[in-house]
Image (cartoon, rainbow, N blue to C red):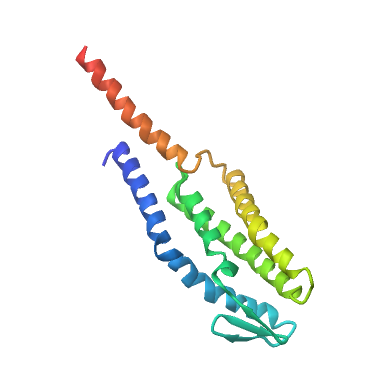
């Protein structure tokens, strides 16, 4: 397989993975992250009480916390996956390292967010803080982690754009070569 074919095949596989993992309303992300998030929260909360897990709810200090998909932030993990897999010019080992580190950072930040929300659940301003964290801060976390990954791993590609530019240049360089041969 020549380098050009290998590059096109790599692009195809990366975007196929992006599509497959996005199917079924992000089922794979939520299917994995929900029990892991609940277990980790139970572990952390057990230092200050006796949490009980019932399905996807945590009963803790006379309050029931329903861990819904938004709490798990599966869409944020999927967005991070898209950013990592739609960036051109990253070798597979480095790509997996970036994915693992960014997922770990996102998971820790999300757990801290949930613990903070659990700690202020009885506060009169809980709904406002919850709304703010959900709508703004979670996006800032993903962008911040991505910027950190770009800096840390010295990434040069721009998600999606670099692949499209490569394919565009590939298509147009072939046309220029054919035109030159005719003359």
Q: Position of residue 102 (x, y in %)?
A: 57, 56
Total count of labels: 0
x then y, percent, for residue 69: 54, 69
Query: Is 183 positioned to the left or the right of 135 in the image?
Result: left
Q: Is residue 8 left or right of residue 155?
A: left
Q: Residue furthest left?
A: 182
Residue 63 lies in quadrant: bottom right
Residue at 56% x, 73% y is 68
Q: Nearer the viewer, residue 3 or 126?
A: 126
**Rendering coords of residue 86 (x, y %):** 45, 47
Of residues 112 and 55, the one drawn nearer to the viewer in this rendering: 55
Q: Furthest-right residue in view?
A: 124
Could you say which quadrant of the image residue 52 lies in?
bottom right
Quarter the C terminus occupies: top left
Q: Is residue 159 above or below residue 180?
A: below
Up-down relation of residue 154 to residue 134 (above or below): above
Judge left or right: residue 112 versus residue 2: right
Seen at 71% across and 70% down, the residue is 117
Please determine whether, in this image, residue 48 is positioned above or below residue 7.
below
**Residue 48 picture location, percent across and down:** 75, 82
Which residue does the image show at 58% across and 73% down from the upper left? 37
Q: Is residue 164 above or below residue 94?
A: above
Task: State the residue lying farthest toward the top.
Answer: 183
Quadrant for the N terminus in the image: top left
């Amino acid at each position: 397989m020549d380098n050009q074919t290998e590059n096109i095949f790599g692009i195809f596989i990366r975007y196929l993975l992006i599509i497959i993992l996005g199917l079924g309303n992000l089922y794979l992300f939520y299917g994995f992250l929900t029990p892991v998030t609940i277990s980790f929260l139970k572990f952390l909360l057990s230092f200050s009480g006796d949490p009980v897990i019932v399905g996807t709810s945590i009963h803790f200090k006379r309050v029931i916390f329903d861990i819904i998909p938004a709490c798990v932030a599966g869409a944020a993990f999927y967005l991070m996956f898209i950013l990592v897999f739609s960036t051109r010019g990253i070798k597979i080992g480095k790509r997996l390292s970036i994915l693992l580190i960014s997922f770990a950072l996102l998971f820790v930040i999300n757990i801290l967010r949930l613990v903070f929300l659990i700690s202020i659940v009885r506060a009169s301003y809980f709904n406002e803080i919850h709304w703010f964290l959900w709508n703004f801060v979670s996006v800032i976390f993903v962008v911040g982690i991505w910027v950190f990954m770009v800096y840390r791993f010295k990434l040069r590609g721009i998600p999606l754009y670099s692949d499209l530019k490569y394919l565009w240049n590939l298509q147009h360089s072939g046309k220029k070569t054919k035109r030159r041969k005719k003359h």
